[in-house]
Image (cartoon, grey):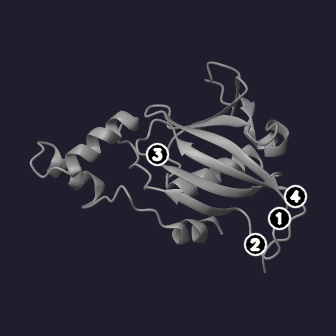
Amino acid sequence: MPKKSKDSIYRLKVTLRGSKPPIWRRLLVPDSITLYKLHDIIQVAMGWTDSHLHQFIIENEYYGIPHPDDWRPVIDERNYRLKKVTQSEGFQFIYEYDFGDSWEHQILLEKIQPPEPGIEYPICTKGKRACPPEDVGGVWGYSDFLEAINDPDHTEHDSYIEWVGGEFDAEKFNIEEINEALH
């Protein structure tokens, strides 16, 4: 049975910054989720494997899991609900994943709406393109990767194909798989 929600629902558009053509997901999430839970949802929706550190940057404040080795103050994301750190429709903030590759995601609060009867949240309603492979080197490395796998004569073609596991379809987006994983 779907979970009943009295929360407002936030329609978020999550776009991988610097991706051309754009890689993005549209998500419907309860406004009461913590930033930590939003991290989990983004990981599933984008196709990341949660193998690296992450943070949210909201109005020049950094939210994540604090660690003694942090070089700047980090606010504990587990203690902050989405509705407490977002302002209104049109509000934007950053989710960064993998500080080495620096995958920055622009998150736009597109709409605040009431929950729909019979809908289980969170849910992905739309998106475009596959998530880049982990550890490919950020948007610049991903561009080089795509160039190499799409050119059989490229000097790195064979090694990239082997590294990625045989094939990679940059246009693949499977909303059913994402929503199954979210639930």
Q: Looking at the picture, which amino acid does disc 3 mark?
A: Pro
Pointer 2 with pointer 1, Cβ within 8 A:
yes
* Residue 28, position as x, y percentages in the image: 71, 58
Q: Looking at the picture, which amino acid does disc 4 mark?
A: Asp
Hey, which residue is sitting farthest left in the picture?
153
At a point 85% along the width and 70% down the height, the residue shown is 4
Per the model, the C-alpha gap separating discs 3 and 1 is 28 Å
Residue 65 visible in the shown view: no
Q: Secondary structure at mark 1?
A: loop
Q: Nearer the viewer, residue 155 or 63?
A: 155
Above/below status of 81 relative to 168: above
Q: Looking at the picture, which amino acid does disc 1 mark?
A: Pro
Q: Which residue is identified by label 1?
A: 115
Pointer 4 with pointer 1, Cβ within 8 A:
yes
* Residue 1, position as x, y percentages in the image: 78, 81
Q: Secondary structure at mark 2?
A: loop
At a point 31% along the width and 40% down the height, the residue shown is 143
Which of discs 4 and 1 lies nearer the camera? The answer is 1
Q: Looking at the picture, which amino acid does disc 2 mark?
A: Ile
Hey, which residue is sitting farthest top in the picture?
71
Q: Which residue is identified by label 4?
A: 7
Q: Earlier in the sequence, mark 3 or mark 2?
A: 3
Q: Secondary structure at mark 4?
A: loop
At a point 60% along the width and 51% down the height, the residue shown is 42
Q: Earlier in the sequence, mark 4 or mark 2?
A: 4
